[in-house]
């Protein structure tokens, strides 16, 4: 496939993934659909440790620049989920209150 970006022409060949037809099929909104199974999993890009202007970073967000995978901390994740849930509840109630105030003319 020939592509052009800001006057630069280049060829792009998307990776071809071999699949086989699955047994599960059906019809949704008048269109036929069928599951497809991967015959061979795609090769993922390995994580790289990169440096830009002296700052180390990685192209894989779950791997630190040192190359060791980060293990999620259960306490920090659960705390974040709880705080996020509380924040969303507060935003929802504030939105409902503002709509009600607007409807009654305050």
Image (spheres, rainbow, N blue to C red):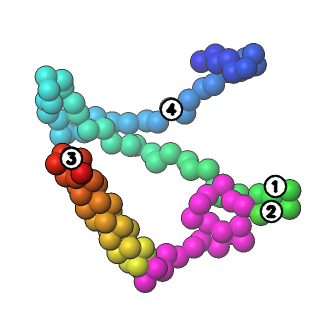
* Depth check, front residue: 24 or 95: 95
What is the chief secondary structure element of the magenta stretch?
loop
* Residue 42 on image: x %, y %: 50, 45
Q: In the displayed structure, would residue 70 be above or below residue 8?
A: below
At label 1, counting other C-alpha atoms closer than 10 Å, the crowd grade (few under 14, some 14-19, many 20 or more) is few
- Quadrant in which the N terminus is drawn: top right
Left/right placement of residue 47 relative to residue 96 reads right
* Residue 77 on image: x %, y %: 43, 75
Q: Which residue is mark 2?
A: 55
Mark closer to the chain start, 3 or 1: 1
Q: In the displayed structure, would residue 29 be above or below residue 89?
A: above
- Give how far apart the Cα atoms at labels 4 and 1 are: 32 Å
At label 4, counting other C-alpha atoms closer than 10 Å, the crowd grade (few under 14, some 14-19, many 20 or more) is few
Secondary structure, mark 2, is strand
Q: Which residue is mark 4?
A: 16
The mark closer to the camera, 4 or 2, is: 2
Q: Residue furthest right?
A: 53
Secondary structure, mark 3, is loop
Q: In the displayed structure, would residue 100 be above or below residue 64?
A: above
* Residue 74 on image: x %, y %: 42, 81
Magenta extent: 57-76
* Depth check, front residue: 60 or 98: 98
Q: In the displayed structure, would residue 56 be above or below residue 82?
A: above
């Amino acid at each position: 496939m020939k592509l052009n970006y800001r006057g630069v022409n280049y060829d792009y060949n998307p990776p071809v993934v071999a699949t086989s037809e699955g047994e599960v099929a059906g019809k949704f909104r008048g269109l036929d659909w069928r599951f497809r199974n991967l015959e061979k999993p795609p090769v993922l890009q390995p994580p790289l440790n990169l440096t830009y202007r002296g700052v180390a970073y990685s192209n894989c967000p779950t791997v630190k620049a040192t190359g060791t995978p980060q293990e999620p901390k259960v306490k920090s994740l659960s705390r974040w989920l709880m705080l996020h849930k509380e924040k969303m509840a507060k935003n929802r109630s504030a939105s409902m209150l503002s709509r009600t105030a607007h409807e009654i003319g305050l």
